[in-house]
Amino acid sequence: MAFFQRPTEYPCQLILDPQNDYETLRRRVEQTTLKAQTVNRNRSGVTNVSSPGKALNLYPSNEYEVLPSGSEAHWEVVERILFIYAKLNPGIAYVQGMNEIVGPIYYTFATDPNSEWKEHAEADTFFCFTNLMSENRDNFIKSLDDSQCGITYKMESVYSMLKDKDLELYLKLEEQNIKPQYFTFRWLTLLLSQEFLLPDVIRIWDTLFSDQDRFHFLILVCCAMLILIRESLLAGDFTVNMRSLQDYPISDVHTILTKAKELQDNS
């Protein structure tokens, strides 16, 4: 997105001050590659196809044109947040996909119409991202994948709920051997941030984060997404259905959230 390439109005003066000897993270990352685990093939057994135009792609830094000396792009601020988080949490470090979670949070703070709030977007984002990851980090720890708090259990929970809500559709996906990890891995790990455009992601997160049992509600949202395209899934073959699930066809998030709330009320 163009926003992340633009310079921030509030760069880190301590780093940019020529009187200081601090080296910018930009230069450090240009010289070395941060070791990042992969959330695609290694974790789910298949290569997830990302949807063109939907992913934020904030990381790594060499994807963007470097701004002149004395200025910082928004992506550099996000990069610093992720870098510091990785340093403070060596047990998790940086895992590919964290950028998709921190991006919408930073964008929300950095575009606040109140400049007094916007000035502290970096610190506020770091605080909120750290708190969100304290609830969501088990999804990023490979050793916990098969535990009750791990991502495998959550992926299977989507199918368990679908079996309860729409047995016919569940049996169709099982018959075609479409496993939940083929598509729900990305949905759950990245909180649907790659499935929709940024304004729609923020709208989904408003509902998600306002629910006390937010990650259970996320399961409901995923189940609603499947039920809303049940007719095309029931009619499609493996290839067609996989394409739909990896590039979700419905863009009206209000419809999805309404269906998820309906499922929740009928539980």
Image (cartoon, rainbow, N blue to C red):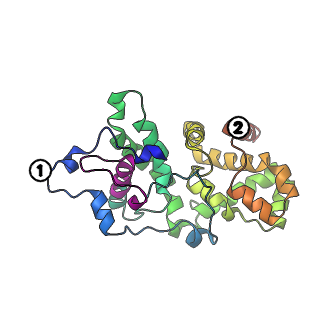
The quadrant the C terminus occupies is top right
Point out which mark residue 167 bears. Answer: none
- Give the residue number, with chain letter if any, for mark 2: 261
- Give the residue number, with chain letter if any, for mark 1: 19
Residue 267 colored magenta? Answer: no
| Mark 1 element type | loop
Of 111 and 202, nearer the camera is: 111
Residue 220 shown left or right of residue 237 in the figure: left
Q: Quadrant of residue 243?
A: bottom right
Residue 35 shown left or right of residue 71 in the figure: right
In the image, residue 180 lies at what x, y percent? 70, 62
Residue displayed at 38% across by 46% down: 74
Residue displayed at 73% across by 46% down: 224
Residue displayed at 60% across by 50% down: 192
Q: What segment carries the magenta color?
A: 60-84
Residue 35 shown left or right of residue 155 in the figure: left
Mark 1 is surrounded, within 10 Å at the Cα level, by few (under 14), some (14 to 19) or many (20 or more) other residues, namely few
Residue 72 colored magenta? Answer: yes
Q: Quadrant of residue 28?
A: bottom left
Which numbered disc, 1 or 2, marks the residue that appears first in the sequence?
A: 1
